[in-house]
Amino acid sequence: MMGNAGAREIYFEFVALGNSVRVSAICSVTGVEVQVIGPANAARRDLEQLALRKLERRLAETEAPPLPAAGRGGFTI
């Protein structure tokens, strides 16, 4: 998404915590971060979607511009 000043990317971080995993979703523009915890054997994509929905709700509360419908991809750390 280079060259688009309004572009926003989402970074995902996965941290194993025993039988659980903590997933952080971070907005590249605002720096807003949310975390969810799920079972370690859950599908990675399901945990990303859960964290993304939580991030979208948090951004709506902070008056930040909404995430675009297209190009909502993220990076996994």
Image (spheres, grey):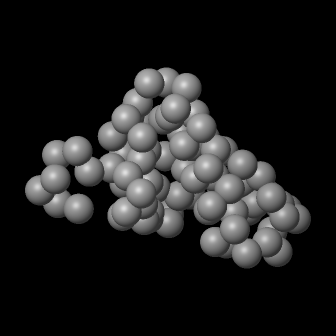
Q: Residue at x 82, y 74 (%)?
A: 41
- Pick the residue in front: 46 or 70: 70
Instruction: Tell me: 47 left or right of 38.
Output: left
Give how far across and how far down residue 71 sits, in percent: 36, 64
Farthest-out residue, top = 62
Q: Quadrant of residue 9?
A: bottom left
Q: Residue at x 26, y 51 (%)?
A: 7
Q: Quadrant of the N terminus?
A: bottom left
Note whether 24 is above or below 2 in the view shown.
above
Give how far across and how far down residue 40 sits, in percent: 81, 68
- Pick the residue in front: 28 or 59: 59
Farthest-out residue, right = 19
Instruction: Tell me: 42 left or right of 8.
Output: right
Instruction: Tell me: 25 left or right of 31.
Output: right
Q: Does residue 14 show up? A: no
Q: Residue at x 33, y 40 (%)?
A: 29
Give how far across and how far down residue 3 sits, in percent: 11, 56
Q: Quadrant of residue 15?
A: bottom right
Q: Residue at x 52, y 32 (%)?
A: 60
